[in-house]
């Protein structure tokens, strides 16, 4: 199964990805595109610029494209479209809908980790709280509006309950999906 996890920074995506990989035999976690670009020498601004988000979006689309089975993706192109929206860019002007559709079609499940009462009480405070909040709002709008018709056929699981129940919720959702 191929699972994409999307959410703003500081919502437990990486932890969830690692925990899922530990519970799903043979699954690997694909590094977040930020780290892959950084390893290649890309220098990001703080906060990242619009060009940084565009580079991340492009890298994220490419990372979903290889048909490797049994992968958990720590971030998807939806994240970077949402960060662009939070930075004042109209996401509809970014990327080709066909490329996004092809990338998302490889996923069996799209998991959304929004800001919740639990993330705010249990997890450490995140950097750039204004950007974090704007990205969260943009992500929730984009995931359900899907202006690209890119992930319309991918089941979406929004995790709003306690952090301790996230892995179980994802595993339950995956057990209801046909194997790819």
Image (spheres, rainbow, N blue to C red):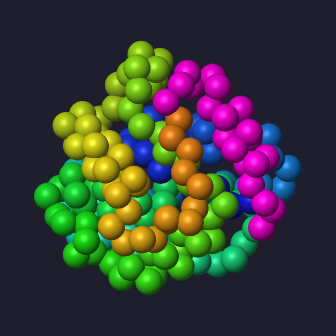
| Image quadrant in which the N terminus is located | bottom right
- Horizontal and vertical percent position of residue 176: 76, 48
Residue drawn 49% across the image and 45% down it: 112
Does residue 23 lie above or below 108 as drawn? Answer: above
What's the magenta bit mostly, secondary-structure-wise? Answer: helix
- Which quadrant of the structure image shows residue 126? top left
Q: Compare residues 111 and 132 and report the one nearer the observer.
A: 111
- Horizontal and vertical percent position of residue 66: 64, 78
Q: Is residue 166 left or right of residue 144?
A: right
Residue drawn 85% across the image and 50% down it: 25
- Horizontal and vertical percent position of residue 37: 44, 68
Residue 39 at least partly seen: no
Residue drawn 61% across the image and 39% down it: 16
Residue drawn 74% across the image and 39% down it: 172
Residue 3 at least partly seen: yes
| Image quadrant in which the C terminus is located | bottom right
Question: Does the magenta portion include 175?
Answer: yes
- Horizontal and vertical percent position of residue 32: 51, 57
Residue occupying the far right of the picture? 25
Q: Compare residues 67 and 56 and report the one nearer the observer.
A: 67
Does residue 169 lie above or below 90 as drawn? Answer: above
Residue occupying the far left of the picture? 88
- Which quadrant of the structure image shows residue 64? bottom right
Q: Report the number of discs.
A: 0
Does residue 26 lie above or below 124 as drawn? Answer: below
Magenta residues (range): 160-180
Question: Does the magenta portion include 139?
Answer: no
- Which quadrant of the structure image shows residue 114? top left
Q: Is residue 159 left or right of residue 97?
A: right
């Amino acid at each position: 199964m191929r699972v994409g996890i999307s959410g703003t920074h500081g919502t437990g995506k990486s932890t969830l990805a690692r925990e899922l990989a530990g519970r799903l035999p043979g699954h690997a976690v694909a590094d977040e595109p930020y780290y892959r670009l950084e390893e290649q020498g890309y220098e990001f601004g703080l906060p990242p610029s619009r060009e940084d988000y565009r580079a991340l979006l492009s890298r994220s689309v490419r990372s979903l494209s290889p048909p490797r089975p049994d992968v958990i993706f720590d971030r998807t192109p939806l994240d970077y479209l949402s960060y662009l929206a939070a930075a004042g860019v109209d996401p509809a002007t970014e990327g080709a809908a066909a490329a996004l559709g092809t990338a998302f079609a490889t996923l069996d499940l799209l998991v959304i980790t929004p800001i919740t009462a639990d993330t705010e009480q249990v997890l450490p405070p995140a950097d750039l709280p204004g950007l974090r909040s704007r990205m969260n709002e943009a992500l929730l709008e984009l995931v359900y509006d899907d202006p690209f018709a890119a992930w319309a056929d991918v089941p979406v699981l929004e995790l709003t309950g306690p952090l301790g129940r996230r892995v179980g919720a994802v595993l339950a959702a995956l057990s209801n999906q046909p194997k790819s």
